Image: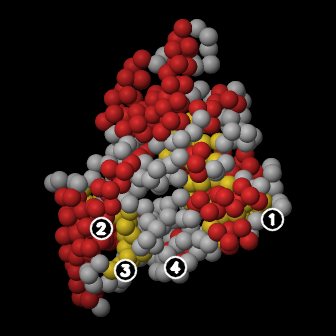
Amino acid sequence: MTRHDLDHASTAPLRPSAREALVEALSTVAGDPSRVHADGLTARAMLEDARDRVATTFGARSREVVFTSGATESIASACWGAAERGSNQVVPAVEHSAVRLAAAQHGEARVVAVDVFGRVDPADVLGAVDDDTALVHVQWGNHEVGTVQPVAAVVAACRERGVLVHVDAAQAAGHATLDFRELGADLVSISGHKLGGPAGSGVLLVRRGVRLRPLLPGGEQELARRAGLENVAAAIGLAAAVETIDVDAESALQTSLIDRLRGAVESVSGVTIYGDPEHHLPHLLCLGVADVEPQAVLFGLDRLGISAHSGSACASAELEPSPVLAAMGVDAHRSLRFSVGWSSTRADVDAAAEALPEVLAELRSLGSSAS
């Protein structure tokens, strides 16, 4: 059976360029980049070359790039590093759990409401800021419904107010142009595996002049911002991946694929489309599905060779409703998320468009029979 991966927002397949670079690095990098012998100096040169390439891609200076194990660690580092600056952090209600939970570990997490599309008002964000605010968070694009936040406005207002601002770009990087210098944020977290880089790779961009205590102390690696032997191979693989991305071309293709899928399913009975119709990531579509449980839909789609995800955490072991959908005031228990990426094709979305009505009809028929 041909498989159709429509869950790129969870993790994307490794790009061929990243795989090639990763395999080569694993075969050649033998030294500790902190040592002055030949093997160490070779590893250091390769690591710094990767840092330069990542910095160039994201409009940053090399010294602003901190390699991490992924966006979750980058977020935790931002929250921990800034926490000594104040007793509260400002968190829009639709932020990823990695942001919400990390912020709540360091004093008060001041939650800011969103509208029915999941979009926050910059004035509301600034209204939650006071003289004891350590950090303001704003997500570039939402991981469940795809809504893009007014990031530039929030960043500008925070900079004017003199409070640090962190942008979670885990879903946006690779799908939207990210220019760190132009954005003006203090901190930006990026995931490697979501854009086709190696699992276990990520970046925290730290604006020049911003001082953060390290989440991982114990060594002077990463300019004393993250202790421990660097994962040189992962950094090299990540650099190869981000250099491969043609954001304009890929986002245009992804937009066309998602538009094609949206057009096919919007007339399906009991299906509602969530998220901001105007301010939206190109690669993600979230649907509300009435009268059926998302786990059953996911299993039905999987049986037909389609990988998707439930936008609600109901598909996880915790069986909790989605805080994102709850914050939007919609059904937080029944949703589906389809997402495309660099390797997606029209055949993938056409397969999903054909399968979804079939699966929903079958499940609703079973429900009617049971009643």
CA gap between label 1 and label 3 equals 38 Å
Query: Which secondary structure lies at badge 3?
Result: strand
Q: Earlier in the sequence, mark 4 or mark 3?
A: 4
| Residue at image location 50% in from the left, 64% down from the top | 148
- Residue highlighted by disc 3: 272
Choose mark 3 or mark 2, whichever is in front.
2
Q: Earlier in the sequence, mark 4 or mark 2?
A: 4
The kind of residue on which mark 3 rests is Thr
Choose mark 1 or mark 3, whichever is in front.
1
Choose mark 4 or mark 2, whichever is in front.
2
The kind of residue on which mark 2 rests is Asp
- Residue highlighted by disc 1: 130
Question: How far from the left and from the top, in percent, is residue 271?
Answer: 33, 80
Q: Nearer the viewer, residue 292 or 50?
A: 50
Using the rendered image of the protein, determine whether residue 82 is visible from the camera's viewpoint: yes
- Where residue 256 sits, quadrant-wise, is bottom left
- Residue highlighted by disc 4: 116
Q: Earlier in the sequence, mark 3 or mark 2?
A: 2
The kind of residue on which mark 4 rests is Val
CA gap between label 4 and label 3 equals 13 Å
Q: Residues within 10 Å of mark 4 (few under 14, many from 20)?
A: some
Q: Earlier in the sequence, mark 4 or mark 1?
A: 4
Q: Across the whole image, how many numbered discs are drawn on residues?
A: 4
Question: How far from the left and from the top, in percent, is residue 105?
Answer: 71, 56
Q: Nearer the viewer, residue 181 or 346?
A: 181
Question: How far from the left and from the top, in percent, is residue 126?
Answer: 72, 67
Query: Which secondary structure lies at badge 2?
Result: helix
Q: Residues within 10 Å of mark 1 (few under 14, many from 20)?
A: some
Disc assigned to residue 259: 2
> Residue at the top extreme?
38
| Residue at image location 54% in from the left, 8% down from the top | 38
- Cβ–Cβ below 8 Å for labels 4 and 2? no
